[in-house]
Image (spheres, helix red, strand yellow):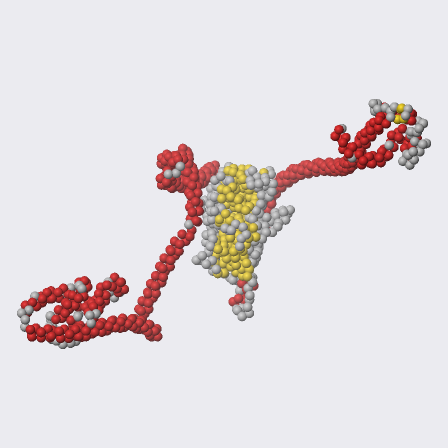
Amino acid sequence: MGDWWTPAMMTDPILDTKDLSSISGISISPSRQNSLPSLHSTMTLPKTSYSVLSAFCTEENVSQCITYINQEVCSLGLSGVSLECNSDGLNAVPVLNLLYELVQLHRKAQRTLQELESQQLKNESDVNHLQHNNSRLKDQLEHARRENSGLHEGERQLQLKIKTLQNCLKSEKEEVQKLQSIISSRATQYNHDTKRKERECTKLKERLNQLLMDKRDKKLAIEVSNYVGRSDGKRGLWKTGKMEARHEGEMYKALLSDYESRQRSLMLENSELKKVLQHMKKDMISILSPKKPCVKTEPAEDSLEQVASEGEEETTDSSRETLEQSCEQAREQLTNSIRLQWRKLKSHMERLDSQASLVACQERESEDVISRREHEEEMQRMRLEVQQCKDFIHMQQQLLQQDMSSPCDEETAALLNDCYTLEEKERLKEEWRLFNEQKKNFERERRNFTEAAIRLGHERKAFEDDRAAWLKTQFLNMTPFVDRKRPALPETQSALSVSTEPEAKIQSTPPLLTKSQSYTAFSTPKAAPVKMPSTADLYRSLRLIPESRSHGRRQSSETLDKSRLRHGSADCSVFSLVRDENSPI
Amino acid sequence: MNFSDVLKQSNQLCKISPDGKYVATCVQYRLMVRDIINLQIVHLYSCLDQVMHIEWSSDSMFILCAMYKRGLVQVWSLEQPDWHCKIDEGSIGLVSSRWSPDGRHILNTTEFHLRITVWSLCTKSVSYIKYPKACQKGMDFTSDGRYMALAERRECKDYISVFVCDDWHLLRHFESETQDLAGLEWSPNGCVLAVWDSCLEYKILLYSLDGRLLSSYSAYEWSLGIKSVTWSPSSQFLVIGSYDEKVRILNHITWKKIKEFDHPGTINNCKKSVYKEVEQTTVVGGDNLSIHQLTAGNSLFSPKSKYEITPLPAQLPVIKPDLDRANPKIGISAMAFSSDNRYLATKNDNMPQSLWLWDMQKLCLLTVLEHTAPIRCFIWDPSRPRLALCTGNTKVYIWSAAGCLSVNLRVEGIFQVQSLLWHPSGSSIVLLSKEQFCICYMDSED
């Protein structure tokens, strides 16, 4: 309450103004309860607030009013506060207290009223809602009821229908039964009738037969000009018991022979089948046995099986022996072993299949490698084909040549001749070219030699000059240095013998030395004639070098390039010798 | 293929002698026996009336001519042209006449199946067999001619009698477990007798020669049953054609079904082949119309045809039979084995234009031959696996494992092949039209 107090006081002016209007309004209710006059008074209060007549309290009735108020207050439960009437009038404090109390009361009442009103509103809305809901549910209920009744109606109708159908079915059944009975009765009737008819028929036939027989039909006859012998040539026999027995015997014989032949064929078939079985078994064993090593590498279960199969094989052999005697036991054994092996084979096949599929997968991956191989193979094949074609062409040519050799069509002969001369010409041309080349080479060499010869001539000349000068000086001087020259000569001769050795040696010898050698070589045989050597002489004297060259050429005509590459140095050296000879000049 | 001249014939009476030397034909009341090679008339006999049926005796020495209307049978001898035999069945009537296998007895069935009269040419004796049953095939001889099985009906029950043909001694007589026996047939080895019930009940019974019931077989109940029954020449298979358009094959050891051949309207198994006859409209140009073509009327006015392989799945022409009528045109009505047991030919009645050929080694369908017209007749070559068939037009169709062909008859006039007969050696075929016949000589090399 304390909390509430202050703000209430704070907002007093506003509250008061509000309250004033509300008071005026609300004050109606208690007054209404009290009496009409009071109501009247309060009604008129705002207008004539101080009109004496209508006022509740007047000068005269103050005490009465007080008591009345007191009573009222008492009845309101505010007993602690009572108004006392003094002589000088109303004591203000209790009145104010009372008033305050009243105001409080009023406020409370007001609040509760408000609450109640809101409650009321809420309730009203609730009620509304509920009412609405109710009505809705009622509608639903109604609908459901209607539906229900409809369904009920349908059900009833269906029931009715069922009933009628059942009736129908029953009647149908009855009809069917009736019809069936009719049919059966008819059938029996008809059967009976047919039987009767048949009997009658037979009777009639009998009768007819009888009559015909009795009548001794004149027409019934056979006219044969003369009797015919039996096809088998035998005579007809009398029907006797013996004959009957013979017929029986023959019949049984025929049957027996049939059964025998059938048995024979079955036996044959059986033996065939046995053979097949045996063969199969053998095959199976042969298929399974070489697998042993590779199988053994596989898990233990297989090896176990293998052991079993080994044991099996023994029994197989025994069964094979007993196969010929077709006794029960052997058969059973055989079938059992076959079955076992078959199972094994199957499992093996399955394993192989799985492996094969794996391999296939792998192969698919490495397909391009295969394709390359195939490609190569294809290439090989094609090459072979080409070779074959060539051979073929060659053969054709040969044949053509043969044809050519034999006198044939002149035109084609001429054409072929042309062809061949052309070929010949080509070959000759080629040879010519080679020859030319050779000639050119020779020419060049010759030129080189002539040049070398010229140079040699010059040198010799110089040498001659020198010698002449030297001889002159010798001659002129006539000094005792003569014996000094003697030992020098054999030395040079030995050097000459060295020079005749292969070029490789020459190559190794320093050019200066060869020079001296050549000097000595030329000097020794032809010391006396001092003249220019002819080219023929040159060739003769220098045969050593060109001959070896030509020899080298001839030998390496095909492998010229190779030899050039390999023995290039040797060749070069030959030329270098010449060049070295040239160089000093 | 060459064709002989066209000669006259009546009632499709044209038979080749069992020894293959002669061909007997009837024109009205005249019986002519011709040499098969040059068709020269060797003998000419005159019967008392129009002949309805002729039959060679097994030794080719006699020919039987039956005149059913008069109840007469006349027998002629080839060796002694002046020898003559006349059998008169008298007022009792005659419906069927046939030779016994020995060629010395004639079995005449009288009207109303009253009895079977057995006439002997050797002794002039006559014997009767009473109560023969009137049915599809009530009498059959074993192939060696020793025994005859006869269906009988006594006191509304079916009986089977087995006779020894030598002296017509009744060997066995036993009741058959049929409701209404429709037919019986000996196995080719003569040891098993197949007996089947009428179409109202699917039931086939197998009896031993001594009358023991070996086995019985029924595929289904409550609908129309067996339509045709055939033994394989080796006696190994018994094939049963039925109204459910299926062929069932029984084996000879257990007498159980080993295979069922269906005749579907569509063939979609790509391993099979369907040959369809395709007619080619010939363009007759005015320029190349030679006299030869004019005279050869047959080939001129009838379109050429050839077999073409139909791409699968192939639809076969199927007619819808009226199932409410008796003997509906449905089911397997004809079956025939090739002489080497290798092939089976069947005809389904509601696919009358198609012939089905089955491989009996693989027990599966081989080919279907589809024609432009319903098949009239198909017969295997007795000497090799070759089949000839006709469809009532001017062509002959030949099938062999190598292939099939249709041959237009190069004969004068219009010749529509209604029926055909193979020569026992397989060297020629006798082609019969309504009023004529000619011989088609096969090329020797094929």
- Work out whether B272 lies above or below A392: above
Q: Is residue B415 visible?
A: no
Q: Would residue B31 appear left or right of A260 to someone viewing this image?
A: right
Q: Quadrant of the C terminus of chain B?
A: bottom left
Q: Nearer the viewer, residue B338 or A141?
A: A141
The quadrant in which residue A490 appears is bottom left
Residue A281 in the image, given as x and y percentages of width and height: 39, 40
The quadrant in which residue A176 appears is top right
Q: Nearer the viewer, residue A187 or A450?
A: A450
Q: Would residue B112 appear left or right of A246 to someone viewing this image?
A: right
Residue A517 in the image, given as x and y percentages of width and height: 14, 67
Residue B419 in the image, given as x and y percentages of width and height: 54, 55
- Residue plotted at (49% across, 58% down): B440
Label tally: 0
Q: Is residue A294 visible?
A: yes
Q: Nearer the viewer, residue B89 or B431?
A: B431
- Residue plotted at (11% across, 71% down): A525
Residue A180 in the image, given as x and y percentages of width and height: 67, 37
The quadrant in which residue B180 appears is top right
- Work out whether B71 lies above or below B5: above
- Residue plotted at (57% across, 52% down): B315
